[in-house]
Amino acid sequence: MHRKKFAPRRPTVALGMFTAASLAVIMAAEPSAAASTLGAQAAQSGRYFGTAVPAGKLGDGTYVGILDREFNMITPENEMKWDTTEPSRGSFNFGPGDSIVSHAQAHGQRMRGHTLVWHSQLPGWVSSIGDANTLRSVMDNHITQEMSHYKGKIYAWDVVNEAFADDGSGRHRSSVFQNLLGDGFIEEAFKTARSVDSSAKLCYNDYSIEDWNSPKTQGVYNMVKDFKSRGVPIDCVGFQSHFGTGGPPSSFQTTLSNFAALGVDVQITELDIAQASSTAYGNTVKACMNVSRCTGITVWGIRDSDSWRTGENPLLFDNNGNKKAAYSAVLTALGG
C-alpha cells in the first residue's frame, strides 16, 4: 500500500506529472503479472502455446471453448497431409484444412502447416510411383500447390516429416522418396518450399530426436548443420516429444541448445507425456524456456479423450475438459 504524500505548496499540474512519472517507474519495476492461460503466458516471453486440432472437433462446444481460451497456435491433425490434400494426382482437396484455418483466423490463432512430405498417410498412387523424375515432379508440384493455397496464412511448415530411421544408423529411413530420389529429396523439398513462400518458416520435424546421444538425433543434427553451411533453406527443427512417464531425457535442453546454435529455431511440436506427471511436463517446458530460440510448444491434443494415446492419459485436460495438475505445472514453467 502506498502512503499518501502531502505537498501543499506544489502546483497541481506538477503534482499530476510527479504522480504519473512515479506510477510509470513503479510499473516498469514490477514484472508482468502472470497470465491465466497457456497461450497468454507463453506470449509474455514471445513464444506460442498450441495444440493439434482435427476439423471434426470444431463442432464440439466444450472442446472449442478450451481451444480458444488456451491456445494461440494450431496444427491441423490430419487435414493438411497428402492423403487428404491430394488423394488422386493433380486433384486437390483443401476443404478440411480450410475449415481449421478459418477458425484460427477468426480467433486470433496462428497456424503450423503439417505436413508436406511424409512417408506415411500417403495415397497409394504416390507410393506406387516407380520413376524418379515422375516422383520429383509430383513432390515439387504437391509442395507448390499446397503452400500456394495457404500462402500468407501459415506461420511455419513441417516441410519434411520423420525422414530418419529408428535403427540406430543415423541415416534416412526407407521410403518411396528416399528409394527413388536418394538423400537429396529433403534438400529438394526445402528449396521448392522456399521458392513458393519466402516468409513462412520451414521446419524439419521428427520424433525420438530429443536425446542428444541418440544416433537419430545426431543424424538430424548433421543434416541441419550441412544445410546451414551450404545455404539450404531451413528455419526450424520440430521435436515431437512423445514422451513416456519419465518425461524428457536429461540431455533434452542440451539438444535444443545445440540445434539452436546452428542458427535455427527449435519448437516442441507434438508434446504428450504418458500419465502426464506435473514434473515431466514442467521439465519439458523449462527446457524450452531456457533456450532463447525455442519459440513455442504444441501439445498433441487437448483432452485425454482427444489423444492418439488415450489409454495413457497424456494431455493437460481430462476427458471432461478439466485442467489436470500438469496444466498448473506448465503454466508456472511458462512464467520462467
Image: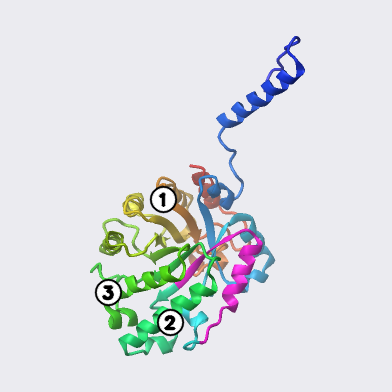
Label 3, residues with CA under 10 Å away: few <14, some 14-19, many ≥20? some
Q: Position of residue 134 (x, y in %)?
A: 36, 87
Whether residue 285 is visible, yes or no, is: yes
Q: Which residue is mark 1?
A: 293
Q: Of marks 1 and 2, which one's residue comes earlier in the chain?
A: 2
Amino acid carrying mark 1 in the image:
Arg
Mark 3 or mark 2, which is nearer the start of the sequence? 2
Left or right: 236, with 76 as reference point: left
Residue 32 located left or right of residue 277: right
Q: Amino acid at mark 3?
A: Asp
**Residue 323 % position (x, y):** 59, 54
> Could you tell me which residue is drawn at 61 percent across and 64 percent down?
104
Return the residue found at the far top.
9
Between circles 1 and 2, the one closer to the viewer is 1
Q: Which residue is mark 2?
A: 122
- Residue 216, given in percent of the width and then of the height, sits at 28, 64
Residue found 52% across the figure and 87% down from its top:
91
Residue 320 picture location, percent across and down: 63, 62
The image quadrant where one finds the N terminus is: top right
**Label located before the other in sequence (3 or 1):** 3
Q: Nearer the viewer, residue 44 or 35?
A: 44
